[in-house]
Amino acid sequence: MIIFQKIKNVVKREVYFLKVAYKVYRLMNTKEETINEEEAYQSGIIQCSELSFLRELVQKSNVLPGPIIEIGTLFGYSTRKIALWKSSSKKFITVDNYSWNPYAIDKTSHFKLTKRILSPLIKSANVIQINMEKNEFYKKYSGEVPAMVFLDANHSYEETKHDIYWAKRVGAKIICGHDYLQAFQEVKRAVDESGTLAGLQRSLWLLSYGGVANLDSCAQIKEVKE
Ligand SMILES: C[S@@+](CC[C@H](N)C(=O)[O-])C[C@H]1O[C@@H](n2cnc3c(N)ncnc32)[C@H](O)[C@@H]1O
């Protein structure tokens, strides 16, 4: 009886995982303009109306030395967009500890599903998927000064502040992130306290901060600001 119950639970879990995988693959392959705001919000992904600004920032980072670093991969929606727009030689590191997803699948399944989604990019587009707590990654990072850091992980005040602090400390040329929104007051506060808002498209924010000539090397970003 107990064995039967265990088998039943395993089958139930697998069926649920397959349903989630189907949903995620479908979302990944849906034309961005047909994903409505609520669906994107509930799915935890970047909005269609923010993509042109993200694309612009990636294109700016293409002419700067150093990698692009994304903090918060989820299932790789924004990762795939960034990978598509970056130059082929540009290294792109995406970091997640798989602690959250909107379907509550376990960490291991979440990581494996995302790895499968990103595998063509990992194999051939210089994309590196790192399964790690972000603060641990910050401690260990000893690579080149990043051209761009895109922050979209934990949206608490302390964590966002720390993310920006690290990006500044390593001298990232472009520091941007997601969810500068009324609903995420803590992100707003952390961004506002860390520098000046140099660009905002819906909730996609770009920071200008003293000492780093990011805006001087990115004339178009200035236009976004004005
Ligand atoms: C909003 S989702 C990222 C969405 C993704 N950028 C997109 O647009 O498709 C936030 C992600 O941050 C991750 N995360 C939260 N806290 C983290 C931490 N301390 N270290 C690493 N990743 C974290 C979660 O596991 C989740 O996958």
Image (cartoon, rainbow, N blue to C red):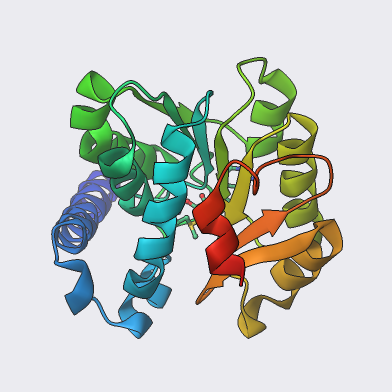
Q: Nearer the viewer, residue 105 or 94?
A: 94
Instruction: Give me the residue at 56% from left, 31% from top.
Output: 132
Residue 45 seen in render: no
- Name the quadrant containing residue 19: bottom left
Instruction: Give me the residue at 45% from left, 32% from top.
Output: 63
Report the side of 204 relative to 156 (left or right): left
- In the displayed structure, 94 sits above or below 57; it is above
- In the displayed structure, 175 sits above or below 140; it is below
Instruction: Give me the residue at 38% from left, 38% from top.
Output: 111
Report the side of 183 relative to 164 (left or right): left
- Name the quadrant containing residue 115: top left
- In the displayed structure, 133 sits above or below 80; it is above
Q: How many marks?
A: 0
Tell me where residue 71 appears, x and y as whole percent: 55, 43
Report the side of 32 relative to 181 (left or right): left
- Name the quadrant containing residue 38: bottom left
Instruction: Give me the residue at 38% from left, 71% from top.
Output: 47
In which quadrant will I find the C terminus? bottom right
- In the displayed structure, 60 sits above or below 193; it is above
Tell me where residue 221 appears, x and y as whole percent: 54, 57
Tell me where residue 225 appears, x and y as whole percent: 61, 68
Residue 81 seen in render: yes
Q: Nearer the viewer, residue 16 or 92?
A: 92
